Image (cartoon, rainbow, N blue to C red):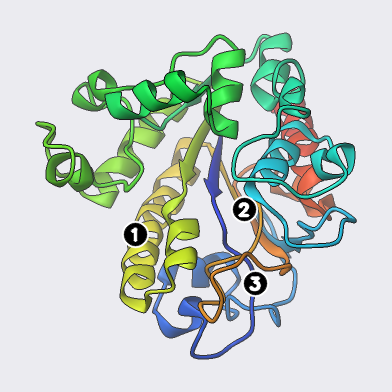
């Protein structure tokens, strides 16, 4: 039994309208997770046996627009990083809050409990070269390194043990000229499930949603959401029968409002399906997610 954490960067619950790609596209997985409600701010919390949908505050008591650095540090530590820093900050974790990812991250906490964990994402060599030269690591990659875990590379992609940023690997072929096969979203989901069969906690990050929100291109937004929805639908179908619990949430709003390049102050979605889902119904802000994950892992 494993907890699969699907972190989707930059999606909130916005208003119904022409600037919201969630209401303009048919997304079967998102429709299922909301209990067949619109994926908008008007949706109500939904709970039944082994299925929770609600929304979380991502503003953390601070003025201004939530940002990825403070939002993700908060999400993966349970500490209000924006309050500690005195402002929202991103996209990378600020130097004054990086210490939170070296002892208080969910990976650190899992290690303390002797639980196994795995970060599914893989990165090309160009990423490692840039990050090491500039010493600029994202929240998830920094907390992975700080926990003594290996970051996946092309080697894990070729061994079918990891997933690329765009899920289907074509960007590595087309833009980086790397000799990797193009795969389906369903195949990527199978890799996640295979990892969940071996580890207590599996994290997968999808950041192209935030990029699509900043780009404000409806066609790109539709493409990004279609890939995510297909991956998500496959995970939903496969996780339950294997006894795994699937969780999805975000760090701030963005993609739900293509009328602006900026992030939003909208609440973010929080879905959980599988054994022990009811535990997560107590969540009110993104600060609650990691503590509730640890509570779930203590019980299951």
Q: Few, some or many C-alpha atoms within 10 Å of disc 3 (few <14, some 14-19, many ≥20)?
A: many
Q: Position of residue 113 (x, y in %)?
A: 73, 12
Q: CA distance from mark 1 to mark 2?
A: 18 Å
Would you place residue 139 above or below residue 289 in this image? above
Q: Which residue corresponds to the image point at 70% horizontal and 23% vertical from the top-left?
A: 101
Q: CA distance from mark 3 to mark 1?
A: 20 Å
Instruction: Classify residue 224 as left or right of residue 15.
Output: left
Would you place residue 47 above or below residue 147 in this image? below
Q: Which mark is residue 144?
A: none
Confirm or deny contact between disc 1 and disc 2 (CB under 8 A): no
Specify the farthest residue to the front. 134
Q: Which mark is residue 13?
A: 3
Q: For mark 2, what is the residue? A: 250
Instruction: Classify residue 63 as left or right of residue 262.
Output: right
Would you place residue 35 above or below residue 38 in this image? above
Q: Few, some or many C-alpha atoms within 10 Å of disc 2 (few <14, some 14-19, many ≥20)?
A: many
Quadrant in the picture for residue 284: bottom right
Q: Position of residue 129 (x, y in %)?
A: 35, 21
Q: Which mark is residue 230?
A: 1
Q: Quadrant of the C terminus?
A: top right
Q: Earlier in the sequence, mark 1 or mark 2?
A: 1
Q: Few, some or many C-alpha atoms within 10 Å of disc 1 (few <14, some 14-19, many ≥20)?
A: some
User: Which mark lies nearer to you, 3 or 1?
Assistant: 3
Q: Earlier in the sequence, mark 3 or mark 1?
A: 3
Q: Which residue corresponds to the image point at 49% horizontal and 90% vertical from the top-left?
A: 18
Q: Position of residue 83 (x, y in %)?
A: 88, 43
Quadrant in the picture for residue 47: bottom right
Q: Which residue corresponds to the image point at 57% horizontal and 58% vertical from the top-left?
A: 10
Q: Secondary structure at mark 1?
A: helix
């Amino acid at each position: 039994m494993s907890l699969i954490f699907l972190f989707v960067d930059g999606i909130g619950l916005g208003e119904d309208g022409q600037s919201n790609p969630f209401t303009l596209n048919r997304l079967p997985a998102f429709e299922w997770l909301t209990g067949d409600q619109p994926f908008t701010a008007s949706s109500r919390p939904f709970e039944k046996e082994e299925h929770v949908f609600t929304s979380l505050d991502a503003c953390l008591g601070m003025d201004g627009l939530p940002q990825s650095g403070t939002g993700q540090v908060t999400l993966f530590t349970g500490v209000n990083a924006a309050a500690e820093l005195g402002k929202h900050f991103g996209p990378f974790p600020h130097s004054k809050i990086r210490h939170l990812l070296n002892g208080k991250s969910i990976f650190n906490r899992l290690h303390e409990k002797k639980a196994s964990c795995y970060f599914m994402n893989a990165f090309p060599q160009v990423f490692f070269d840039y990050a090491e030269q500039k010493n600029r690591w994202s929240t998830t990659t920094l907390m992975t390194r700080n926990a003594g875990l290996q970051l996946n590379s092309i080697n894990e992609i070729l061994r079918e043990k990891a997933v690329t940023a765009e899920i289907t690997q074509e960007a590595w072929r087309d833009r980086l000229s790397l000799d990797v096969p193009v795969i389906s979203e369903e195949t990527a989901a199978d890799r996640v499930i295979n990892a969940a069969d071996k580890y207590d906690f599996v994290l997968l990050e999808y950041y192209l949603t935030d990029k699509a929100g900043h780009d404000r291109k409806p066609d790109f937004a539709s493409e990004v959401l279609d890939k995510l929805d297909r991956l998500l639908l496959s995970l939903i179908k496969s996780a339950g029968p294997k006894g795994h619990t699937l969780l999805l949430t975000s760090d701030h709003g963005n993609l739900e409002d293509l009328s602006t390049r900026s992030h939003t102050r909208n609440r973010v979605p929080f879905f959980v399906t599988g054994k022990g889902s009811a535990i997560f119904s107590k969540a009110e802000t993104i600060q609650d997610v990691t503590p509730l994950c640890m509570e779930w892992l203590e019980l299951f």
